[in-house]
Image: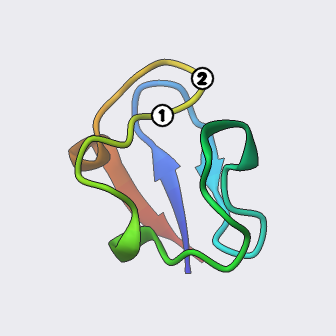
Amino acid sequence: MKYECGPCGYVYDPAEGDPDNGIAPGTAFEDLPEDWVCPVCGASKEEFSPVE
């Protein structure tokens, strides 16, 4: 499942992770650190919603 940032539209894809911020590919959204933020706009995890 992918998750989209409400404020900016960035999509977190678990298959890709967020390697620029130390998140390995294969990391589920639920397993991201609580202090992880959108790499584009800095929004918190609470600002993300699931997308197909």
Helix, strand or loop status at disc 1: loop
Residue occupying the point 50% across, 78% down: 28
**Residue 22, position as x, y percentages in the image:** 62, 48
Task: Give the numbered dot on residue 26.
Answer: none
Q: Nearer the viewer, residue 4 or 13?
A: 13
Q: Count the labels in the image.
A: 2
Task: Determine the CA span between mark 1 and mark 2.
Answer: 5 Å
Q: Which residue is mark 2?
A: 40
For residue 25, which quarter of the picture? bottom right
**Residue 23, position as x, y percentages in the image:** 60, 56
Q: Residue reaching furthest front? A: 22
Quarter placement of the N terminus = bottom right
Is there a contact, CB below 8 Å, between mark 1 and mark 2? yes
Q: Left or right: 17 with respect to 27?
A: right
Quarter placement of the C terminus = bottom right
Q: Nearer the viewer, residue 7 or 22?
A: 22
Give the crowd class for mark 1: few <14, some 14-19, many >=20 residues within 10 Å.
many
Image vertical order of residue 43 relative to residue 33, above or below: above
For residue 6, which quarter of the picture? top left
Q: Left or right: 41 with respect to 16?
A: left
**Residue 43, position as x, y percentages in the image:** 35, 28
Task: Give the numbered dot on residue 38.
Answer: 1
Residue occupying the point 57% across, 29% down: 39
Give the crowd class for mark 2: few <14, some 14-19, many >=20 residues within 10 Å.
few
Please state which amino acid type lies under the numbered disc 1: Cys
Please state which amino acid type lies under the numbered disc 2: Val
**Residue 49, position as x, y percentages in the image:** 37, 58
Helix, strand or loop status at disc 2: loop
